[in-house]
Image (tube, rainbow, N blue to C red):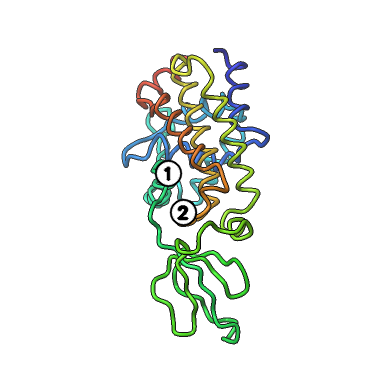
Amino acid sequence: MDDVAFNRLVIRVLGRSAPRVWSLLVTMFGDLALAPQARLSGATVNAITAVIGIKPEATRVALHRLRKEDWIDSHRTGRQTRYGLTPHGRAQTNAAWPRVYGPPPEDVAAFLVVEDPSAPIDRAMDDTRAAVQIGPRTFVTTAGEAGGDTLRLPLGAVGPLPRWVADKLCPPEVQEAAGDLAQRLGLLLTEDGLQHLSLLHRTALRVTVVHEWRRLILRTPGFTEPLVAGHWAGAECRAAVHDVLTRLPVPDLAQLEQDVDAA
């Protein structure tokens, strides 16, 4: 497949919006070079972004931004610059890894919490980050014990969530994006011969798919996934992503660099 035909395939995955280059590079390094000693040469980074349709100038600016933000570092090896995740970048990637690559969360104990409306307005609901406000002094949370003036009901006991509650936990635009991505990935999986693409094209396509899924799944709090399963296409997206990644495994970086240098 030539670069023009491959670019059409990438556009099918990306849909209507071009990716932010720095965000795509975060995905690229997290997917291909997570190991502490793993590095991507500048030529390899540019080759991957180029076949996705990104100009070298944009890639250079994004690399500079990520170095400045302590997400990646760089060093020279002969005439080549090589890039890798910093400890900070690796820690952030590992924190998101279960959401991006793992199975959906199961058996999450979530509660509908209603606070006393007469309590001081600046009082914190609780100190947990796993909480979504759905109304005045009303939350869905994974927090443990309730205070004496707080009503707390386990959501598993109240049956299916009303649509308006599901829309708070997973906004309609995220639901729409999930349906769109599921459709695009479904079309991608109908393509014959993905495994016969060049190593560079397989790698770029893998990075693009992971990036689109990562952008989607990190827009919804993990604990809410089981609660909104009937309201978005997250399960279909996850299954399609895992299928694609099975067909397009992480490349051997030395072989990828060798192919890029030989091109």
Task: Report which quarter residue 248 is drawn in.
Answer: top left
Is label 2 in contact with label 1 (beta carbons under 8 Å)? no
Q: Secondary structure at mark 1?
A: strand
Q: Which residue is mark 1?
A: 73
> Nearest the camera: 92 or 147?
147
What is the x, y in percent for residue 25? 51, 38
Amino acid on which the number 2 mark rests in the picture:
Gly
Q: Position of residue 254 (x, y in %)?
A: 35, 24
Q: Residue at x 40, y 50 (%)?
A: 105
Q: Give the crowd class for mark 1: few <14, some 14-19, many >=20 residues within 10 Å.
A: some
Vertical side of 175 occupied by 251: above or below: above
Residue that appears at 38% across and 35% down: 39
Where does the image place residue 45, in percent across and percent down from the top left? Answer: 49, 30
* Quarter the N terminus occupies: top right
Residue 114 vertical position relative to residue 21 in the rendered view, above or below: below
Question: Pointer 2: what residue?
Answer: 222
Numbered badge on residue 46: none
Q: Secondary structure at mark 2?
A: helix
Which residue is painted at 41% across and 24% down in the image?
A: 247
State which quadrant residue 35 falls in.
Answer: top left
Residue 220 position, x and y percent, is 53, 52
| In the image, farthest residue toward the right | 16
Residue at 41% from the left image edge and 41% from the top image edge: 101
**C-alpha gap between disc 2 and disc 1:** 30 Å
Closer mark to the observer between disc 2 and disc 1: 2
Q: Tag 1: residue type? A: Asp
Above or below for 150 versus 204:
below
Local packing at callout 2 (Cα closer than 10 Å; few below 14, some 14-19, many 20+) is some
In-image side of 67 versus 88 (left or right): right
Disc tally is 2
Q: Nearer the viewer, residue 215 or 25?
A: 215
**Mark 2 vs 1, N-terminal side:** 1
